[in-house]
Image (cartoon, rainbow, N blue to C red):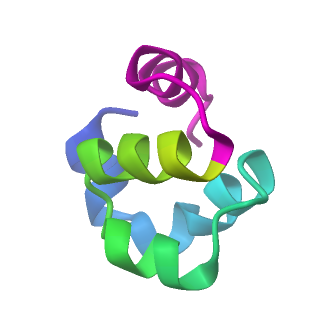
Amino acid sequence: MNWDEIKGKWNQVQGQAKTRWAKLTDDDLLAVEGHKDKLVGKVQERYGITKEEAERQVDEHQWT
């Protein structure tokens, strides 16, 4: 699934993100609004990892 699809289905795939990155709050997920760069930033912030690592995790996640 590409990011245009993910953004369009964000309400449906938020649960996947919450399962994968449990430290993300509901408010974090609402703020992301399906934007990849915002999700990367939230993952980086909550997990204390580099931007590159957060991007890798988001890119490698199997969105369905």
Which of 34/51 is in front? 51
Total number of numbered discs in the rendering: 0
Region rendered in magenta: 47-64
Which of 27/63 is in front? 27
What is the x, y in percent for residue 30?
42, 80
Which secondary structure type mostly characterizes the magenta part of the structure? helix
> Where on the picture, by quarter, is residue 51?
top left
Q: What residue is at 41 percent from the left and 15 percent from the top?
A: 52
Q: What residue is at 64 percent from the left and 64 percent from the top?
A: 24
What is the x, y in percent for residue 47?
66, 42
Q: Please give left or right for residue 41 compared with residue 24 in the image.
A: left
Q: Please give left or right for residue 27 compared with residue 22 in the image.
A: left
What is the x, y in percent for residue 50?
48, 22
**Quarter holding the C terminus?**
top right
Quick check: is 60 in the magenta stretch?
yes
What is the x, y in percent for residue 53?
52, 17
Q: Residue furthest front?
A: 48
Residue 36 vs 15, above or below: the answer is above
Which of 60/52 is in front? 52
**Quarter holding the N terminus?**
top left
Q: Residue furthest left?
A: 4
Quick check: is 52 in the magenta stretch?
yes
Residue 24 vs 61, above or below: the answer is below
Q: What residue is at 36 percent from the left and 51 percent from the top?
A: 6
